[in-house]
Amino acid sequence: MKRSFIREILEYINGDTISFAGGLPDETLFPAEKIRVAFLEVLKRPESLQYCNSSGYKPLKKMIADIYNRRGFKTTSENILITSGSQQALDIISRFFQGKNIIVERPSYLGAINSFILNKMFIKYIDIDSRGVNPQELYNLSKSSDLAYLIPDFHNPTGVTTSVIQREKIADICEQHRLYLIEDAPYSELYFEKPFPPISAMIKKQSFHLSSFSKLLAPALRVGWIRADKALLDPLIAYKEAMDLHTNSLSQQAICYFLNRVGEFDEHLAQLRKGYSKKMEYFCKNLDEFLPTFNYLRPSGGMFVYGKFKGVDTRKLLSKCLKEGVIFVPGAEFGGRDDEIRFNFTHSSFEDIEKGVKKIAKILY
Amino acid sequence: MKRSFIREILEYINGDTISFAGGLPDETLFPAEKIRVAFLEVLKRPESLQYCNSSGYKPLKKMIADIYNRRGFKTTSENILITSGSQQALDIISRFFQGKNIIVERPSYLGAINSFILNKMFIKYIDIDSRGVNPQELYNLSKSSDLAYLIPDFHNPTGVTTSVIQREKIADICEQHRLYLIEDAPYSELYFEKPFPPISAMIKKQSFHLSSFSKLLAPALRVGWIRADKALLDPLIAYKEAMDLHTNSLSQQAICYFLNRVGEFDEHLAQLRKGYSKKMEYFCKNLDEFLPTFNYLRPSGGMFVYGKFKGVDTRKLLSKCLKEGVIFVPGAEFGGRDDEIRFNFTHSSFEDIEKGVKKIAKILY
């Protein structure tokens, strides 16, 4: 199995490299002090250091269920399985569906594809355009497939958001062909203007809705979850148990403490949306100014700008850029075309965004 | 797949139940305040909340390597892969060796057996007696096997410690038949008198030595590791990455801070050994006094006393005990005989040990 290019590169870059590569959150927007207070409180009780339930810390499951309920997606604790990040959620589900046929957008998140490969699933790719996947194509593939893996909100890597009408069509197709939907939603709360309705809410009995606190609070916490119908979720708990007994319970308890502080989580999310929106604007302004031949889609949320330098081999471009201390991910790494690129706009400072884009311009032109 | 009896029961017992069931550490011996200080320090730096390397936090890998080196088992950071507890270490390895033939002691740790089943391995059981596995039997099975899974120190569930002579014979057999050894060593540091030499050190190129901080510091940290030859370890990193990207890095950094405080870890381990040794003595004293028909082996470390009530169906006994508020694990759950029992002696207070043993006596006699 191939290692993730991004994660391999993460091991080799040094502190001076300007990275538009990984999907790293902005460190200056971590609610670091509040997380610190949360751990401090949790660790006052020695029992907090003991083993915990395989399905997750009960109060946290309840709180996550409440988040769904507030959005009108009826959910109880029994619909929630806490995982060690969203990546493990993908692994658990694809392990359960080992060897099945799965429809995947092209390009798509490499970590998911790796998970499907590791679990010997048969991947059928469906091209994604600026409105999401084409319903007719999805319909055609559905007949001979068992699952579909989609990232409808601020897609990774393309930044595309599937329209509401398209979502309804997708739900219909899933229902009609008894297709299980894995809806990966790590960026859904990172909208710049408005949130979008999850497809899973339209097909509750055959959907897995995945999310995580990695992008909303901090990656180091390694807490993600699966929201699914109880009948779908129960067999996955036995897998989770055999895989790592349970997710880090200190993180789970600390998140619980944080979410319990009325208003704090909402306030933090509002700051995050505002901060990321500003960074996206600034990144695009720099692209327009210094890299005018980069043809891209302006995202309405999330962490990525995706586009192309027509006719340029972006892998070769990357090798040159690496030497000059600026990196990004070539679209081909995600199954995209050879002249495409994914830029992450959240991690670098405003200063580094300008510096990095200018460096690429100098190499390219 | 069957869920672990112990972990399922953990979800249903209430606070008043006296539990000799799970392998739970003594909460009063957690270095809770020191762990709290460690998290406090780590969380001062917002960067501590970011993503980390898949193979683990580098300074922690170095420290674990040093622990091996101090014991004369030559090791570098490149021999260490940090996992989300030892359970994940088992899962990663058995996933890599999916479908292979593995020799497993009978009885053995249920979490490992579940991991092997999940990964479609073919299990060949070998009975364990008071000296460990029989080398001749191991030799016979080796010819048609790929791996062996052993817990040589203070075995779970039986408490048996494999003698040094037997260890050498086992290493020879592994070498002769190119058998990979998975040496599970979570209790090895919990010796009452002296430590035992790891078998892995005698066959470095074909062994995986597993351990974790769950029993040495606290389970909630969910930090374990695999020590193996670099050539064996490298392919496992790609698996680890696809499984959960990386282990909780706050825990990894906090453990690092703790281990960095000269002498503190050794001092803590010394206290733990003393505390557990005392509890074992007290548990055995109560067994001898109130349950004289329980025929057991006195362990020289670890967390368990194993033995039998000749002719008694211990599953039936457990149902009665559950109602009276005291629990243990029937040996049959681990593949042992119907009249066998595993008692955990570390988790309950001295008071509860006496109360619990007396309750069982009242039900039994």
Image: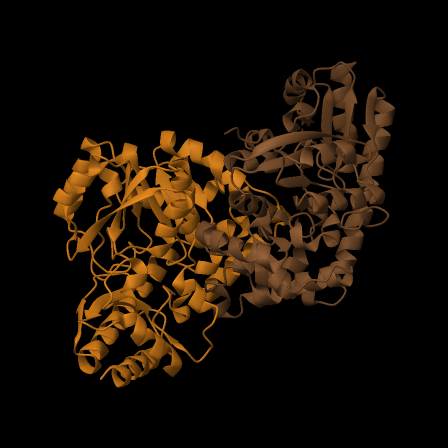
Chain colours: A orange, B brown
Residue in the foreground of this view, choosing between B276 and A10: A10
Residue located 53% across and 65% down the image: B43
Q: Is residue B175 visible?
A: yes
Where residue A226 sits, quadrant-wise, is top left
Where residue B282 sits, quadrant-wise, is top right
Q: Is residue A257 visible?
A: no
Where residue B19 sits, quadrant-wise, is top right
**Position of residue B88 measured from the top left corner of the image (x, y, whole percent):** 55, 46
Residue located 70% across and 15% down the image: B313
Image vertical order of residue A365 relative to residue B194, above or below: below
Image vertical order of residue B251 relative to residue B169, above or below: below
Image vertical order of residue B347 relative to residue B32, above or below: above
Q: Quadrant of the C terminus of chain B?
A: top right
**Position of residue A240 measured from the top left corner of the image (x, y, whole percent):** 48, 40
Answer with left or right where residue B153 lies relative to residue B92.
right
Residue located 52% across and 62% down the image: A36
Answer with left or right where residue B85 lies relative to residue A254.
right
Answer with left or right where residue B283 lies relative to residue A57.
right
Residue located 43% across and 68% down the image: A9
What is the count of numbered marks? 0
Residue in the foreground of this view, choosing between B96 and B174: B174
**Position of residue A200 measured from the top left corner of the image (x, y, whole percent):** 26, 40
**Position of residue B95 measured from the top left corner of the image (x, y, whole percent):** 51, 43
Answer with left or right where residue A108 lies relative to residue A233.
left
